[in-house]
Amino acid sequence: MKIIADSGSTKTHWLVSTNSGQRSHYYTSGINPSLMDAEHIRHIVSSELMPRLATIWWVGPIEIVEFYGAGCAGEEPLGRMRDVLAEFFKHARITVDSDMLGACKALLGNKSGVCAILGTGSNTCYYDGEKIAHSVPSLGFILGDEGGGAYLGKRLVADMLKGLMPEDISQAFRDKYQLTVADVVKHVYREPKPNKYLAQYTYFIAEHIDNAAIRTLVDDSFDAFIRRNILAYHLPALTPIHCVGSIAYVFREQLRQAIEKHNLTLGNLLKEPLQ
């Protein structure tokens, strides 16, 4: 029996599988060991994952657990994540590594290339077919994450509250959310997971992608993602950029056009690594 997990800021996708091909998929809250203590991680695993595993009649002893997640970098976060998983899967061989490496394995297997994650946040790397050989730091949604959901949401909300959007789309936004400046400040500066809060506004962006102002916002965000991240790898013309994540998938046509604008191409595309 094997469990593979892919975890971002918003959710964790768990795949339970047998050698004979039986599979079950589950989702829990996102787990980030760089931002969470052991107790918080333990609570998610014990309250959200383990009860679901108990309902699978064919689950036997778990022999392998592979966890690929945001914030899985550095000995302290990696050790914290491994230790918590070892409490629940005492006899399993446990591997913990970055969500970026998991994305590379999903997109390219043992081939080399440039991979990108575009979900709540964004991240990129050059993968040599076995390991991440080079990466541009993401820097998170305050300093980076260009093109990710939180970045898009931040731009949208800020432009709306500053009166920079046309009246037609501003009215649609007010009708849907009825937000005040105080509401936004509270969520972004005083409550946990502001990146997840901001990323929720990508649903509005997707609904109104045919609006010229919204389309410009998306195009500008993807252009910033490419200029500030992808071009740092100094790639030859027409190099494929392989992408995974909900934002890459939902806005794949806009992403493709932004990539081609810089004389590159869109390569493999997945909504989720565990596909």
Image (cartoon, rainbow, N blue to C red):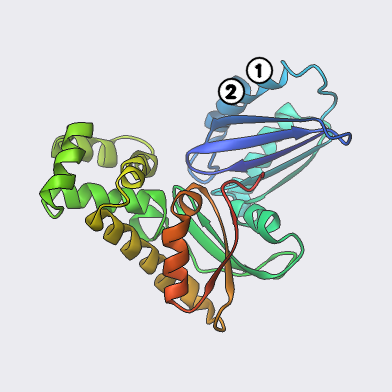
Residues packed near mark 2 inside 10 Å, few (<14), some (14 to 19) or many (20 plus)? some
Q: Of helix, strand and loop, which one carries label 1?
A: helix
> How far apart, in angstroms, are the residues tagged by discs 2 and 1?
6 Å
**Residue 96, horizontal then vertical, whole percent:** 69, 47
Question: In the picture provided, is 107 more to the left or to the right than 158?
Answer: right
Mark 2–mark 1 CB contact (< 8 Å): yes
Closer to the camera, 147 or 176? 176
Read off the residue under disc 2: 48
Instruction: Quadrant for residue 195, please give it.
Output: top left
As drawn, the residue found furthest toward the right would be 20
Residue 151 horizontal side relative to residue 182, left or right? right
In the image, residue 125 sits, relative to residue 28, either above or below, namely below
Disc 2 residue type (three-letter): Glu
Residue 51 is tagged as 1
Residue occupying image coordinates x 44% and y 77%: 262
Name the residue nearer the viewer: 205 or 158: 205
Residue 168 seen: yes
Q: Which residue lies at the image location 62% right of the left edge and 43% below the top edge? A: 6
